[in-house]
Each structure stands twice: as structure tokens, then as C-alpha cells.
Image (cartoon, coloured by chain):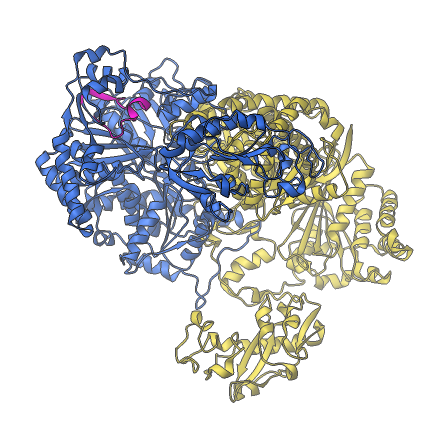
Chain colours: A blue, B yellow
Amino acid sequence: MSVKMTVDGNTAAAHVAYAFSDVAAIYPITPSSPMAEVSDEWAAHDRINLFGQKLRIAEMQSEAGAAGAVHGSLAGGAFTTTFTASQGLLLMIPNMYKISGELLPCVFHVSARALAAHALSIFGDHSDVMACRQTGFAMLASDSVQEVMDLALVAHVAPLRAGVPFLQFFDGFRTSHEIQKIDAIDYEDMKKLVDWDKVKAFRARALNPEHPHQTGTAQNPDIYFQNREAANKFYNAVPAIVEEAMKQVGELTGRHYKLFDYVGAPDAEKVVVLMGSGADCAEEAVDYLVSKGEKVGAVKVHLYRPFSVEHLMAALPATVRKVAVLDRTKEPGSLGEPLYEDVVTALREAGRKVDVLVGGRYGLGSKEFTPTMVKAVFDNLDAARPINHFTVGIVDDVTNLSLPLGETVDAAPSGTFRAKFFGLGSDGTVGANKNSIKIIGNHTDKYVQAYFSYDSKKSGGITVSHLRFGDKPIRSPYLIDTADFIACHNPSYVTRYNVLDGIRDGGIFLLNSPWTLEEMETALPAAMKRTIARKHLRFYNINALEIARGVGLGNRINMVCQAAFFKTAAVINYADAEVYMKEMVKKTFSKKGDKIVNMNNAAIDNAISGLVEIKYPASWADATTGAVPVRVEATEYFNEVIHPILAQEGDKLPVSAFDPSGTVPTGTTKYEKRGIAAFVPKWIKEKCIQCNQCSFVCPHAVLRPVLLNAEQTAAAPAGFECKPATGFAGMNYAMTMSALDCTGCGNCVNACMAKEKALVMVPAEEITETAQAGFDYADKLPAPDVKINKATVKGSQFLKPLFEFSGACAGCGETPSSSSSRSCSAIA
Amino acid sequence: MSVKMTVDGNTAAAHVAYAFSDVAAIYPITPSSPMAEVSDEWAAHDRINLFGQKLRIAEMQSEAGAAGAVHGSLAGGAFTTTFTASQGLLLMIPNMYKISGELLPCVFHVSARALAAHALSIFGDHSDVMACRQTGFAMLASDSVQEVMDLALVAHVAPLRAGVPFLQFFDGFRTSHEIQKIDAIDYEDMKKLVDWDKVKAFRARALNPEHPHQTGTAQNPDIYFQNREAANKFYNAVPAIVEEAMKQVGELTGRHYKLFDYVGAPDAEKVVVLMGSGADCAEEAVDYLVSKGEKVGAVKVHLYRPFSVEHLMAALPATVRKVAVLDRTKEPGSLGEPLYEDVVTALREAGRKVDVLVGGRYGLGSKEFTPTMVKAVFDNLDAARPINHFTVGIVDDVTNLSLPLGETVDAAPSGTFRAKFFGLGSDGTVGANKNSIKIIGNHTDKYVQAYFSYDSKKSGGITVSHLRFGDKPIRSPYLIDTADFIACHNPSYVTRYNVLDGIRDGGIFLLNSPWTLEEMETALPAAMKRTIARKHLRFYNINALEIARGVGLGNRINMVCQAAFFKTAAVINYADAEVYMKEMVKKTFSKKGDKIVNMNNAAIDNAISGLVEIKYPASWADATTGAVPVRVEATEYFNEVIHPILAQEGDKLPVSAFDPSGTVPTGTTKYEKRGIAAFVPKWIKEKCIQCNQCSFVCPHAVLRPVLLNAEQTAAAPAGFECKPATGFAGMNYAMTMSALDCTGCGNCVNACMAKEKALVMVPAEEITETAQAGFDYADKLPAPDVKINKATVKGSQFLKPLFEFSGACAGCGETPSSSSSRSCSAIA
């Protein structure tokens, strides 16, 4: 029995893992954490696994402990799983050798993630799982959310038969967080694949003092090698066991898998070999290219370990002359990345000759991988001198390994609708979009896909929602590069981001702004107007904030924008959409009372009546005037590197923009005045005891104490407040604040040690301008040459001048260096 | 300036590491610990490194912490090193990515060791370093003690020039613990290779608040990939940098290295590729085979990462048609082991075609690797169907991957003298042999090599010393398989071990025994007599114990045996040897007074006068009678697996002897009655309070409490002691002891809770027989069906019957299972 679910890859994996596990020993790490979270929730709701019990989730103190707990739990006869990624997986490596060495069947579900090297990345690639390829775990790669569901089942069925542990992985922050409408497999169906005699045998094998055995001994040179070879037959048997399990899953679901799945022309001459979500993208690209008559294909690797030469050869058409192997990892100093070396070795062992055989890297740290890049990989194979060890998806202007990209390939099957939404973190855009795909997914036969990209600023940052709807399965595991619809939910974005990048000719642009057509002449940048006109966009505006406030929803514009989307995009009939939206409003808010329900319904109604199609003039096609983005005066590094990143154009930065060791200058945040705090601290100088604790605890260095002499005090801007400094005769003291850098957390107020708080939070608009002027003034003052002594500076250890002190310390007599000033005996 | 040192590989590595390091952050793990220990000792003696300071050694709480400390120390501008192996190295993997990612120059010195899988092994192979090949560290392999000295220097010179961290490794428990006479490199000479401007630049790069920079940032998908590629040029430059450093070291020392060193026929058709001590062995074998006219060679891999195709190709003669790549690691489920896949890929990329290209595994967990095995690898290349993914050195009768071995190849250069000594752990044999090689090493031009193998029983176990002396450098990194001299320092060994295995025709056999020729007729086994006669051995006996006791040295036979060795082996003139031995006695014991010196000198003199050449009859060649080894009645597993291991014949066990998961039956120790304790505990029943704590703390389960009914008490053997059991009406209680299993640690006496100790240590001979009889009797008694209740069993929780209790518990009313009995509420 198959049920449709609209879920992400993490949930799909957890669905199967829960069914087959007694115990999950975990430690949370992005992007794997939702697997444990959703499992925990199911357990809290008494979901029962295939063995008639609830999953027991044990959170340990690190992934090293989790792996140890998995090992112990398995030895105790409990079916055990874990969910992890990246550095967390690395911490499990020592125990992985033990688990595989002792032939303990289990499954690790890994949302594959990059490893911290020159910099940390929480995003996806295969560096972590590749660091485990030598541990003796079998490794299964899933390419999409549906495959995670199906192959997780294979991954759980196989170990019990094979006696070998499995690592099932899928791309972190792509498949893990991509929402798709998929067929879920029912637990009753899963049960049919369980070998109950093997279950019994596994339970019986548990360490038990009633019939003791010993495991994990120490062996000397005389016998270790022989015993290490004794497990060969288990590994030799795995490919056939996985094949059989895939067959059974196929019979159950109608979805058939092979160890290596080939897609493309049966007489392909050029083939790419890869695994993970990139393989799904390659399939889309190959389908497109084959439809244009190209003889290309793709081998999607599912069973990566044990690596079966025989099965790879069976997948590869006899006509293949050129092969590119794509690895989503980088191993500096290696001859080539691992999948590439495996394929080279496999071809050699099978005696298969090809004319061109190259390897390349793609998608590190969730770098986009698109059909355009797949095309570039095929083009490289036809080059007179194909680049080996290439990269694709970046511009490498240092070692020149990157492939040039051609025209954007729009490989999506016709009928796919692609919609992109720019929102502000916590403005409700992402939540509304999740509702939209549920509405469309649940009420139609359409396939749906959603992926949400964020910057790293969380609340107050930018969110971009990528939604696809289609009549055919959606194999586009990449951000929308060609859009049918783009919504911009924040008017300030029109000058900050290239919002309309990638919109197709005749596409739809929905803007939330308070502007009339006339105001848009100056409010929109010239380039945006040109794009609107030259691409013949249908352009709608809605004053969502006004409507939301009008019905009493305050700043919550999500319902208004959602209605406007359904109306303008017309993915489904609007009348139906209205019914579904209102049903959802009822479901979501009925507990909060009719008033809230009615407010939201009104928002929907008013959205439609307030929606305006902008009949822009044809002259926009040649617009040269309009809003100009504000550029602050900053360092070259900020302008050349940070600014493009903030403008969402970091993808275009070439390799040469970066220091190879990942080193970056400090102090660049000051050029990005975000001004996101609604409330900021106001200094009440009369109450201040000059302890500087507020400055110490401020996570954004917003509050900074300064000392000023009489002359400096006199020259201060209007409204600058100060008071005589304690312990510094003739000097004034001020606690200055960079209000535009404040996030409004209030730590400073909590930390204030004065009897009555010397800081209070006030609405930002009340003081920002004055406070900022004072801060900017004080920030430029030279460090004063002050006398300090033990008694008077006590408690002032974070006073700014101390770090830039120019004379000998009056307390200890030494000339403190920066590194020693914190421990100067005078201020200790 | 070159100085000869007779040291092991660990000391050689530490010698260089100390010179180049400010900080060593470590955590001790076998077999790497001596590197840190010797460094610590040098620091304690104020040795100064190249930068004019002492090495600071920081021992952390694990290798994970050590790696973190290395990272932090490097970021702070200190030259930093670490020493580790095996699981310890695995714990460093996460930080290794960070260190390489940030291009921090440092050196990890690794005594490469096996990883715990089906079983733990403290011995050598490359599994640990191979688990790090993807971390971005450059990797240098050293094959011998001399190479460790030379390449450690390369490893420390190169990172500063390359900006890439290095992992320098050598075979654990071979090179790490093999003692060789080598040329040491003077610190003044090392200084010449230091780039002082780079030193300055590195120091200047330290994190410093006076000129701050930021490192270790988090990067998003837009820029992570580009930045990860920015370091390519650093890796591309490493091969040339290492080549240059090798050239400079060559100019300094006269010993020249290449990234890949080729040895053998210039027109070789067959070549093996390998690294580590096995490469030294291959060189010896190749020299031998080439001298016999064979066209063979070996490529010794030094720079494994970055892997340079160009340099490998330059090393490989153009005539090569067949290649075998040997990996000292196993990666279950991989297509092939890593070096093999690298060589396959390198040949493909270089367009070099060969007819045969296979990979194989050898030497896992310090399994022996000898010229005989190298020959087998070459022979496999000539087979009609060469085995790929073979193993060599074992008999794989399960998956049939092992290569058959031919006749033993004696590849040592003529003039090499090989001596083997069987001793008892802590009898002084190993120490005496260390002195012998110092004497010969220091006073002659001879090359010396020593390796000591132990069983895992430490004190009281077997030690086998392997000493080689020669006029040419000794490239035999394996145990002596063809011996010129064998000494057996313990008479009981003649029936327990095949002591004379591998002795050459006309060799020398030195036995320490109290036996006359006549007594030897029955004291020696028939097989030993046959070997002595058929191999025409010169056979000497010495009653070392009698001589040692005679001069007042008690059981310390080492000086006697050493003198006998020098006299009989005649590696150097005995008159000289006597002078040197007596000089060493003086040096060692003069602080303890003339009496001790004189006793030792007397031992030397009396050894020579007491040495007897045994003029055995020719009839020994056909001896059929003699001593027969005692075999206990035991389980099949003990007989088939444990017994051969105890007889030092574990190497001969085939793969099929082992459970693939490493599981073994328990309770086999009881068949190996060692009787090694000089003092054992005696139970004084009158004082016993029946608390059973002595039984609880005994690490060998020697002490076991039992309950007996009247009938059982009556049937007990003579001398069996017992007393009325507390809380078990009508039963008697006894604390029985398996004296032959006791190690004499005395924990039981310490743990005794009686007011006056109910256990005292007494000489074993006083009570062993009676105690053992009582233990054996009680051990066979059926578990009694007793009544227990809360009050009376308190404190008796480890009482044997509780684990085999047949009825309901009188305390809690439940029928306790074994697993629950420890927590039964009645006895909690």
C-alpha cells in the first residue's frame, strides 16, 4: 500500500530507520539532526517499529560516544542506527572499524556534508562519507528524496542478510532538506522483506552471561592477518544481496534500482559516472541532450562499497568511448578523487578500453550543479585535450582547472513551473511556501519540489524559496536557474539583489512594495526596469504590508503574498486555491479563535482586490535612470569579496579572490550596517558605574567605552553624552554604541552591574542617528596616553585604551603589549 | 659531521623532530610512545633545538586533544609535532583537515600500526596512515631506521617551504623498535637546511591581537568550493620541494633518495611497488634475485602524497611488463587497496601499458614479510592467470587468495651472522642482547640489527631476540628465518617450542640446561635430536643457573649466557669480547660497589669454564624417543587454535581457523596452567567473614567461593578446608583457589575485609597441589539449590551459586536469570 507524502530526505530516511531500529544512538549535527528530531517525535507519539516497540533514542555527549553506543547496543542484540554527518561522522571512524570488523549489521544514515578545512561548511558534499570508505562499511548512495525512502529500505534489509554494516548517504542540504512529494512505503509492506530467522539469530548472538562468548580480543602478528581475511566471503556476497533486496523493493514499490543505474542513449559514446543528487541532475541533463540527438548517458552509482566491477561493466553501454567521473569531494595531494580512481581501476580490471577517461570535482560545500555544468562536462570529453582533474561550477583562474560553461541549459521537462521567492528571515515567506506546496501536492496529481536557501544571518537575513511543480517527476536538485515566476517580498531587495536573475521571457514578477508606477521610476534600479521590459514580464505589485496591517495582522505579510502567488502564478485554478488556503487557515488557527481565522481570510480576500498589474511603459527597455544601490566606503577586500557575497553574487567570485589558507581580514562587519534591531540600548550616564560589563558581553562589539580629554569632549557631535571618568583624572568617560550593528538581544542590559540599570532598551528610531554619530566620532579618536594604577582601574579591564596603551603601566611599571595587557598585574 | 648511533626507529625520528620543534602535543600510544618518552628525557636534560630552546612536550587527555593542541600551537606560531599511531591517529583526522586546510606546516611522526577491527592489534601495518590519505597531509614513508633519520629531516625541512603539513611514517613494531647502527645527523648540519626567512614568516603569521587576522571561518555554498581550490598550487609544488630537500639531505649525508626509488635490474621485466619496511625487504630479495640473473626490480615509494605520476614513471624502467603493487593495509569492500589503485591510475594517466598489473596485501598486524614472499609475488606475475587482490604470508583456504610460498629464500648478503635467543620475560636475555649489539656496534665496523619479539604475557612470557651482524648494511626487516646461531635460555622450552626452526646446516645451538648428554637422551624431544644431528649443529650446553647461583647472582643468568654467546658464536674475537663485557659490567655496576662488579666478572669467567660442547652421537639423526610435550585435555578450539598459538606456531594457522567476526569461546585460559606465581594466597578460614571481596578483585578468577552440602563436603579431597556458611543453613563455605592460574599480584590480600586478614601470601610450593585439587573438585560440583533471603545473603553477591541458582529467590520471590541476579533486589 503506497501513500503519498510531501517530505524532505531526512524524514524519508527516518521513516525507514525508525521501522527497523530498536535504538538510535545519536549526537545532533547539521544537516542530519532532523532525522533524529522527527524520530524522537514519532517515539513520543508511540509509533511502533517492525519489532513491536518504540525506538529508543539515546543522545550521547558527542558522535564518538554515539558510535560507541551503537557498537555496544549492537553487541547487546539491539537493532541500532545513527544519524550523522561531517565531523560527526569522522568521530565515528574508530568505532566503524570495530563494527565492521565484528560483522555487526547496522545502518548509519548520513546527510553527507563538507568537512571543515580552510573554512567550515555546513553544506553538502561527499568529503565526509569518502573519509569512511576504508572502514569496511558497505555504502549506498541515494540521489533523491524518493530514493532515500527506497534505498534506506535496501540499506536496512541487506545488513542482516550480509552481516556487514551499511552507510546510507544522500546529499546534505540538498536531498536532506529538499521537499518532494514521494511514495512512502508502509511498515506492513516493509515487514514482508524482513528475514525473521535472521532477526532471531542476531538477537541470539547478543553478549549474554548465560551463554558467554568473547569478542574484541587482541591478536598478535601470528594470527591477526588470517583473521582479517576471514571476512572476505561476507563482502564478496554483498553485491548479490543488495541486488536481491533492490529487486524485492522494486516488486513492492514498482521502482527498480540496480547497483549502477544507467540512463541515457543505449548507444552512448560519452558517459558521466557519479552519485548523489548530482546523478539526478545528470539524468535530467542526459534526457534533455538525448532528446536533442546526443549520444550521451549517465551511470548513477548506488552501491559504492563493495565496489562491483562486474555490475559497473554491465551498466556501461558497449559503445562508450569517453568517460568522465565526477567526485563531490576533494582530496588534496591525491592522484585523483576516489570514484575516479575506482572507475579507472574497474575499467583496467575488466579489460575495457576507452579513449578518454577523466575525473573532475563538482559541488563542494553545496556548490550548485546544474544541467549546464553536465553539458560542460560532456563538452570537455570532446575537447582536443580534455582537462583531467577538472572542476566544474566555479572559475579557477589560478590553476585553470575549471571547465567553461556554455549557454544555460534549460533541461526541465515541459510543464514544470518554477517559482522563486525572496523573503526576509522570519517574515513568514518560507512557511507560506511550505503551505503552498502542501496545497498543490495534496490536492493535485502534480509533483512538487521545494528547497529553501538562507544566508547565515538567520532572523533578519535573506531567504530564497525555490518551488517547482510539474506533471513529471522533478529531477532538478539545484536552485532554480530559469524561473517562470519570481516574487520579491521585500521592497528594499530591488537595489540589494539581482532579484530577476534567470527569469524567463514572458515570466511573472510579483513585487511587494508601497510604490505606484510613477514611484517605481525612481524606486527601481534601471537594470531591473530593463529586464522587466526586455523580457516582457507580467509585472504585479501588491502593498502587502498595508493590507496586512489593514486586517490587523501587523507586519505578517505571508498570507497576503501567498494569495497573490496563487492568483498570479495560476499553477492551479484560483477559486480552488482560495478554498484550500482558507481550509488551511481554519486548520491552523481555529484553536486561536474565529477572530484570527477571519483576519487571515480577510487578508486573502484583500490581497486579490489589492493586486495591481503594473502596465509599465515600453521605454523601460532602455531605462538608464532609477534607484542606485548604496555603497559604503570600505576596504578593497570588502568591496571585492564581501560585497559580492552580500549581494548574493558570491558564486561568481573566482578562485583568485581567496587566500588559500582561508585567512581573512578582521573588522569587515563594520561596513555592513544592517540596522535590524527594533530596540537598541540607551545609555543613562547618571546611573553608570563604568564597569564596562555591557561592552564585554555584547556579542557584536556594539557597545564600546571610551575616554576623552577636554578638547575631544568639546569637539564631540551634538547629543554626545559623557561623564567624568573614574580613576582617570581630567578625562571623560562615555559608553558609545554602534546602533546600526545592534541586533537588539539585550545582553547588555542583563549584564549591567549598576544598582539601577544604566542601560534600557528603547525603540531604535529614537536614538540611532545620534548614537551612531557619537560612536563614529569616538571610534576615530587616537588612543589616549593615560596614567593608570592598581586602585583606580579595577573593573575597567576592557576599557578600549588599554589595548592601545602607549606608555608604561602605572600599576605594574611595565609597557604592556597587546597580548599581555589582559593579564597585566595592575588590572588583574 | 656524522656520528654512528645504535638506535631504533622511534629514537631516530625523535632525534630530528626534537631539533625542529618548539612544541610536541602528544598522547601516548604503542608503538609511538618511545618517541615522546625519549624527547621528554632529552628536554629534561636541557637539549636545545635548532631555535635555541627546549622542546615543550604537552600530554593531552587523548589524541583528539593532542591534535587540537597541535592546531592551536601552530596557529600561535610554534613549530609543532606529534607522535602517534593507529586509533590515536584516527582521533586526529578531524583536526588534520583543519591543519592542512589552513596550510599550517607541521610534521606528524607515525609508527604505522594496525587498526582494531575484528580484533585489536598493537602491531604494524599501514591501515592507520591510509585512513588519513584524504586529509590533505603530504605523506612520506621511511623503510628503515636510517631512512627514518634521513627522511624525517626531509619531512621537517619541506613543510616550511611547501606550506603543507607532513605525515612521516615507518612501520610500527618493526622499524619503530628495530635497533640498527646508523649515521646520525648532527643538529649543526640540520641547521644548514633551515630557511630562516621562512621561519620568520611563519612566526609572523601567528594569531596576534596586535595585528589580528581571522582564520577558520564558516563559508556558504557561494564561495567554499573556490576557496578549497585555492590551495592547489601549494600541493602542485610539493614534489619538487621534497625532491630538492632530498637532494640537500643527500649532499649532507651522502645518502640519496628520490620520491620513488628504483632498485634492481635496469632492464627489469617484473617490478613490485611498495613502501615501508617491506620495501627494504624487497630490495634485499631483488638484489638476490638479480644476482641469480632474474630481471626484476622494486619501486620504493617515499612520497606517497602528493602522488607524482611523473616521478613514478621516471622510476619505472621502460622494459617493465608486469607490475605487482603491495599494500600493507586492507579496505574491505574496496575494489583494491589504495597504493594499487594509485599505481593503476598513474599508469593509465601516463599512457604506460603493461601486460600484468595486480595488487596484493601483505604484512597486516606485523605479519612477517620475507624475501621468500617477495619471490612468491614475482612468481605470481609469471602465472598463466596471476591472482589479483592476493594475499601473501598466510594460507587463505577460504577465499583462496593467498600465494603459495616456494623454498625459503636466504637473501642475506654473505657474511651476515644471524643469531636468535629464546628467553623468559624478565630473565635478562633481552637486556643482555642489547648490550651485545652495543659492544659489537661500537667496537667494530660491523652493521648490527636487533629486534625483540614478545608474546603478550609480559613478565613470565617468552622473548625471542633476533640479532644480525654484517659487513654490509642489513636490509632484513623481518624475523630471522635462517639462523646461524640459536640460544635457548630456558630448558623447559625444548618441549614447548620448535626452538631450532630455521637453523642452517652447521649452525650453532647453545642450550642452558642442567642436563648431561645422558640426561638429554630423555630430556630432549626426538625431533630436536634429529635436527641437531641431521643439520650437523655445533651443540653447546651451559648450566647457567648453577653458575649464576654459584657466584651469588641468584636466578640472573644473563651475564653467563652473554659470555657463552660471545664464546660460541665468535662474531668477534672472544678475548676482545671479554674486555668489552667487563668494561660494560664496570660501567653498569660500579656505582653499586666492587662486590657486584666482581660477581658479574666471575659469572663471565665461570661461563667460559662451564661451557660444554655436547658430542652427540650420530644416532640422533634417527632418534625416535625423547621428551614428549605435555598436552592437557581441552576443547577442540583450544587444541586447534590456542595450542598452536602458545607453541609459537600461530603463523601456520589458516584463515579457516578463525571466526570471521573475531568471536572466540570463553574459558580457555584454564587449559593453560602456567604456574608462574612464586607466592600465592593461602585462605585462613577461621578469620574469613565470607564477604567474597577477594574473589571479586582477583583479575584471573583464581579465587572462587563455593557452597557445599554435607555430602559434598565429605567427598572433598584431602586437605580441603571449609566452614559453616553464613546465611545458608546446613551448607559449608570455602574459598577455593586455582593456584596454577595465580600471578601472585596480592590484590586479594589487599581487598580482604576481615579484621585480621583471612588471606596471606605463601610460597607456591607449600600449598599449590592441595589448593589446586580442592579447586578442581569444587569447580565440578553442581550448583546447589539454596534458600536465600535479604538478611542472610547481604555481602555475598558474588557467590558462585547465585549465578546458577535453580529456584525462586527467597529474598525477592523472583526466579533470577543470570543477567538479573546481580541486581536482584534481595541482594542489592
Front residue (pair A521, A80): A521
Residue B434: give x, y in percent of width and height: 75, 46
Q: Which range is magenta?
A: A485-507
| B31 on left or right of A735 | right
Image vertical order of residue A1 relative to residue A211, above or below: above
Residue A19: give x, y in percent of width and height: 28, 53
Image vertical order of residue A94 relative to residue A287, above or below: below
Front residue (pair A420, A414): A420
Residue A18: give x, y in percent of width and height: 30, 52
Image vertical order of residue A125 relative to residue B788, above or below: above
In the rendered structure, does residue A505 fall within the stretch colored magenta?
yes
Front residue (pair B669, B206): B206
Which residue lies at the image location 48% right of the left edge and 79% below the top edge? Answer: B782
Residue A239: give x, y in percent of width and height: 33, 42
- Residue A97 visible to the viewer: yes
- Residue B350 visible to the viewer: no
| A109 on left or right of B158 | left
In the picture, which quadrant includes the N terminus of chain B? top right
